[in-house]
Amino acid sequence: MSDTPRYRRVLLKLSGEALMGAGKFGLDPETVDQIAIDIKEVVDMGVEVCVVVGGGNIFRGLSGAAAGMERSTADYMGMLATIMNSLAMQNALEKINVPTRVQTAIRMDAVAEPYIRRRAERHMEKGRVVIFGAGTGNPYFTTDTAAALRASEMDCEVLLKGTKVDGIYSADPVKDPTATRYESLSYRQVLTEDLGVMDHSAIALTRENNIPIMVFSIYEKGSFAKAVCGQGRFTIVE
Ligand code: UDP
C-alpha cells in the first residue's frame, strides 16, 4: 500500500464477537486468519501494533452473574476467555510469520508472559505484536477499559476499535435503516448521547490521555491499514 501511516504506534481492540465471524459462539478460524492478515499489513508498514482482545464470544461475566453466579467469579471466567482468544490470535499471526507475544494481566506462566509494561514496549520496538490478554486483571471491568488503559500505558497515538460496522451510528444500523454514520464525534458527545460504542470508563480514560478512538469495520478486508492511514470509512472520536 502506497499510503503513509498517520501513526507510529497503535492499539487495536478486537471484541470477542469480531472473532466469531458468522457463527454464534466461539472462534471462526477463517475470520481470525483474515484479521491476522490485516494486522500484518499494518506491521509491514512499520507501525508498532498492540492488541487487546475481548472474550464475549466465549463468556461474559454479566451473563454469568445474571444466571446466578457470583459476579467476580464470572468475570474471572470472562478474563480467561480473553486468553483463549489471545492465543488464537497469536497462532494466526505466527502462521504468517508475524512475531508476537501474549502478555497476561493474570499470571499463567506456562501459557504467556506476565504483563510488564517496559517489556511490552521493548517487544513493540522490535516489531513484535503484543497481545494483551485477561483484560485489566480485575473483575467489574471490560476489555474496552483494558484497551484504553493499555493504550495509555503504551503511549499509543490512537485506539482503533474493530467492530462489525464501519463506524458509530445514530442508532443500530442493523435494526434501523434510517441510522446515520458519524464522521467524527467528541468524547463528550459519545458520553452524553450514550452512543454505546465503548463503556464510559474507557471513554473517560482516552479523553484524559488525549487518545483518539477510531471505530471501523474489521470485517472489511484491509480496513485496518486504511484507518491507520486516515482513509476508508470510520468514525473518529477526539
Ligand atoms: N473482564 C473483566 N475485567 C476486565 C476485562 C474483562 O472482568 O478487565 C471480563 C468480563 O466478565 C467481561 C469478559 O471478561 O464480560 C469478556 O470481556 P468483554 O465483555 O470486554 O469482551 P468483548 O465484549 O470485547 O468481547
Image (cartoon, rainbow, N blue to C red):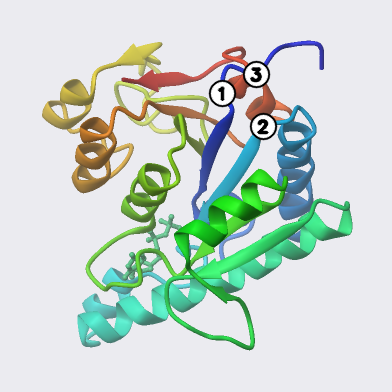
Alpha carbon separation for disc pair 2 and 3: 7 Å
Residue 42: image x %, image y %?
71, 32
Q: Are marks 2 and 1 in contact (CB under 8 Å)?
A: yes
What is the three-letter code of the residue carrying label 1? Tyr
Ligand 1 has an atom within 8 Å of the beta carbon of the residue at disc 2: no
Earlier residue among tags 2 and 3: 3
Q: Which residue occupies the foreground of this view, 150 or 187?
A: 150
Q: Quadrant of ligand 1?
A: bottom left
Label 1 belongs to which residue?
A: 7
What is the three-letter code of the residue carrying label 2? Val
Label 1 environment density (alpha carbons within 10 Å; few <14, some 14–19, many ≥20): some
SS at mark 3? loop
Residue 5: image x %, image y %?
65, 18
What is the three-letter code of the residue carrying label 3? Pro
Can residue 27 be seen here? The reply is: no
Alpha carbon separation for disc pair 1 and 3: 5 Å
Q: Are marks 1 and 3 in contact (CB under 8 Å)?
A: yes
SS at mark 2? loop
209 horizontally vs 11: left or right: left
Quadrant containing the N terminus in the rendered view: top right
Q: Residue 65 sits in which quadrant?
A: bottom left
Residue furthest right as drawn: 96
**Residue ID at (71%, 62%):** 90
Label 3 belongs to which residue?
A: 5
Label 2 belongs to which residue?
A: 47
Ligand 1 has an atom within 8 Å of the beta carbon of the residue at disc 1: no
71 horizontally vs 234: left or right: left
